[in-house]
Image (cartoon, grey):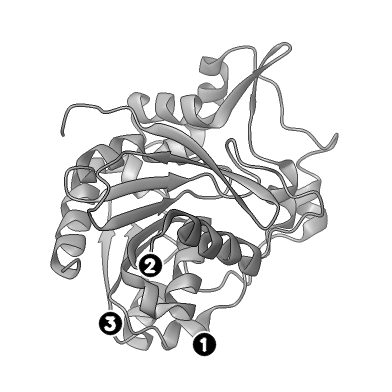
Amino acid sequence: MPDAAEPTSHTVEVGGMKLHYRDWGNEGALPMVFLHGLGGASGDWMRIAESFRADYHVVALDQRGHGESDHSADRAYSTDDFVGDLTGFADALGFNRFALCGHSMGGHNAIAFTARYPERIVCALANDIPPSMPNRASVEDRAAGFPDGQHAVFATKDAWIDSLRPNAEFTSDAHLELMSESRLKAVDGGFQRTSDTNVHIYWEPADLWDEAKAITRPIFFIRGGKSGVLDAATVQKMDMAIEPARSIGLEQSGHNTFFDMEEEWLSVATQFFAAHSD
């Protein structure tokens, strides 16, 4: 992996929302935009961005309700809301055409954007997410996970990391520490997640199957072999239904494939982007 390079931090206003992003420079090269997953942040991509910054103008967006971006005052967390933000963000940065990479919720948004704006997408990667999620828990059940409407406060970052370990058996300590750096803020009594609790409760991913079937740009799906979000049968259906789609499974990985099998993820992602970025 290349030597670490610290990105610069910026904010743009899109539709009255302040959106924060990290920029690794290399202006003039093909832009590559990274979108994190639900509850994540742009800093999740720090290690991955370092491997692409020599060949692309890499930026990672804090999507609304996450990281240092604004929270939606009216709980506007639909697919259309996120895609609208990405459109305005790309316009603000002058990105007419770009490569797009999204994980989980960000991957869902990448599928939608690629279907709706093929003229703007060179190629896209959607990480461990199907075009629709009909079996999500109800809003009431999701809200029950936040009885006081707030994220829990942990005395230390290590305490938060320890709370993740039961569901992160494939994730290294280094990647768990990266998550703690990108997703937590200091508050009275310790540390708390930066994401809006309402995005966890009210995110409503659209059913994108019909739109996805019309995708014309190269798109690559990566599935975590041990993930409960995208199963092998569904990704096979995606391959068959979306003509330019290709996919791969990283079998010793959970949902966060680019954390759990970073070297393998970078190998296949780099090959995909290199083959379709001319």
Q: Amino acid at mark 1?
A: Asp
Mark 3 vs mark 2: in front: 2
Q: Amino acid at mark 3?
A: Pro
Residue 61 disc label = none
Is 80 placed left or right of 173 in the picture? right
Question: Which residue is most to the right?
Answer: 148
- Quadrant of residue 214 in the image? bottom left
Q: CA distance from mark 2 to mark 1?
A: 25 Å
Please state the total of marks drawn on the protein image. 3
Among the two numbered marks 1 and 3 on one chain, the one whose residue lies closer to the N terminus: 1
Is 22 placed left or right of 134 in the picture? left
**Screen quadrant of the N terminus:** top left
Q: Residue beneath label 1, please? A: 210
Element type where label 3 sits in the image: loop
Is residue 229 at least partly visible in the picture? no
Q: Residue beneath label 2, please? A: 96
Is 236 placed left or right of 277 in the picture? right
Residue 244 disc label = 3
Among the two numbered marks 2 and 1 on one chain, the one whose residue lies closer to the N terminus: 2
Q: Is 197 located above or below residue 176 in the figure?
A: below
Name which residue lies at 15% across and 69% down. 278
